[in-house]
Amino acid sequence: MDQRLKEALYIPYIKLHFEVILIEDSILPSNKVSALRGGMGDMLLQSSCVGDGVCEECMFLSECMMQKTIYSQYERKPKFVTTGGSIGYVIECENYERQFLKGARLRFNLLLFGKTVAYFHMFFQAFFNLGKVGIGNMQGKYEIAEVTNSKKRIIYSDGKFDLSQYQVLHILDYVVYRQKQLAHSILEHKLVFQTPVTLKYQRAYLQDFQMEPILIAASRRIYMLDCYIGMDNLYYQQEEFHIPKIVCQSCIKMSVRRYSQRRQMSMYLKGIKGYCVVEEWYPEVLPLLLAGELIHIGKNTSFGFGRYRIK
């Protein structure tokens, strides 16, 4: 692995696996990440905002918990970043069922990166409070049964915390683990997008899969996380990629509706989903793509977009 990339991947992270129990028969949104993200934001706002909700004019802005979690700021803001959203977290949930009976279980993941790792208690409390209010228009209420780490060790269960299991890793650890895993398996040379991905390349949004913009997006995401934590060794490789050739692919266009409480309006997040097969994975490219598996790529990653896996 390239030494610069290895150093750039020394970014702290933790992946938390939430398991919740529905306490009544419920109809939940098919896109649960959007509902969880929106509900989490509402709960954080209600529990932490001591102003009038107008962030730009608030005298407590620098100390606001919303600014340290949902809207956490870059230590060094990249020139191409124009929006104010944080890249410090990602929510994952690929359960698209709508009807849940009382006692049914729902699982979702929360990934925290960089300095956001320190605010687990705020995210947990937000999801805990959201369970009492309920998610989605039908307000399906739940209780948090368990939170575990990536090794299935229990961090929270039965109302008790064991923070000794809150074990922070680095993205490099994940890449090394996946490299060893793939070395002992049959590699299909297949990239499967488990959620829609939104990528802009040469001023246009992708309508099908292309490896060069996918690699650039993974590189850019690493660079953004390095900037987020103020890392000195910034990695942003855009040229001289040995681009794997796509031999076949299957993709569909997708549109996911979400409602923004801040803007008081509905909006649609668009992307493509499916898979592509390449001739081979080049050794200098594989670590970059493996990092992208964990951190997601493209736009709308905090809503679960851009999740893929190498098969």
Image (tube, rainbow, N blue to C red):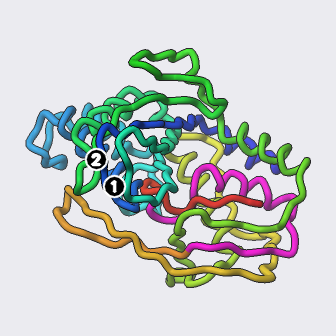
Judged from the image, the secondary structure of the residue bearing numbered disc 2 is loop
Disc 2 residue type?
A: Gly
Residue 242 in the image: state x and y as whole percent.
82, 70
Is 292 included in the stretch rendered in magenta?
yes
Q: Residues within 10 Å of mark 1 (few under 14, many from 20)?
A: many
Identify which residue, 285 or 128, lies in the foreground: 128
Taking the image as shown, residue 8 lies to the left or right of residue 49, namely right
Image quadrant occupied by the C terminus: bottom right
- Residue 48 position, x and y percent, is 21, 33
Within the magenta stretch, is there residue 116? no
Instruction: Give the residue displayed 54% in from the left and 76% down from the top.
Output: 272
Asked whether disc 1 touches disc 2, contact meaning CB atoms under 8 Å apart, the reply is yes
Most extreme residue toward the left is: 52
Image location (x, y in percent) of residue 26: 30, 50
Q: Amino acid at mark 1?
A: Leu
Name the residue nearer the viewer: 152 or 294: 152
Residue for point 48% across, 48% down: 90
**Residue bounds of the magenta highlight:** 273-300
Res. 70 image quadrant: top left
| Pointer 1 residue | 28
Q: Which of the labelled discs sits on residue 140, or is there none?
A: 2
Callout 1 secondary element: loop
In the displayed structure, does residue 300 sit left or right of residue 171? left
Please report the residue visible at 84 percent of the width from the left and 51 percent of the height from the top.
182
| Separation of residues labelled 1 and 2 (CA atoms) | 6 Å
